[in-house]
Image (spheres, rainbow, N blue to C red):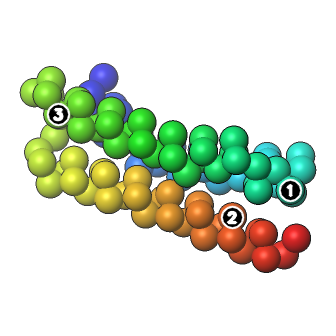
Amino acid sequence: MVRWFYALTPILYPLAALAAFDLTVRADPFALFDRVYTFLALYLAPGLLVLFAIGLAYTGKAPGRYWRLALVVWIGLVTYGHYRLIGIAAAGV
């Protein structure tokens, strides 16, 4: 399971972020400004992913430390990209 997590997170997290953004904009463009959406999308989801990635390192089955660091950096980059995407959409509303 640990290796599957490290293999699927770089693929599924950006897709999930884009899907959440798209569904939110289609439902209500002003929902992007809601504190609940911001908290879930920009704090809770990436925070839990980072904590889970670091926590799995203690199982001994996780990839090396550089792969874990790369995964944490990737989660940060995707979250920043999601934040910028929200800013671009907010400028158009």
Q: CA distance from mark 3 to mark 2?
A: 32 Å
Q: CA distance from mark 1 to mark 3?
A: 39 Å
Is 55 located above or below residue 64 in the figure? Answer: above
- Which one is in front, 62 or 90? 90
Q: Position of residue 19 (x, y in %)?
A: 69, 47
Q: Amino acid at mark 3?
A: Ala
Q: Residue at x 32, y 37 (%)?
A: 51
Return the mark for residue 60.
none
Q: Name the residue carrying label 1.
A: 30
Left or right: residue 15 compared with residue 67 = right
Return the mark for residue 57.
3
Q: Name the residue carrying label 2.
A: 86
Q: Quadrant of the N terminus?
A: top left
Q: CA distance from mark 2 to mark 1?
A: 11 Å
Q: Secondary structure at mark 3?
A: helix
Q: Residue at x 86, y 56 (%)?
A: 30
Left or right: residue 68 compared with residue 24 = left
Report crowding for label 1: few under 14, some 14 to 19, many 20 or more residues within 10 A (C-alpha).
Answer: few
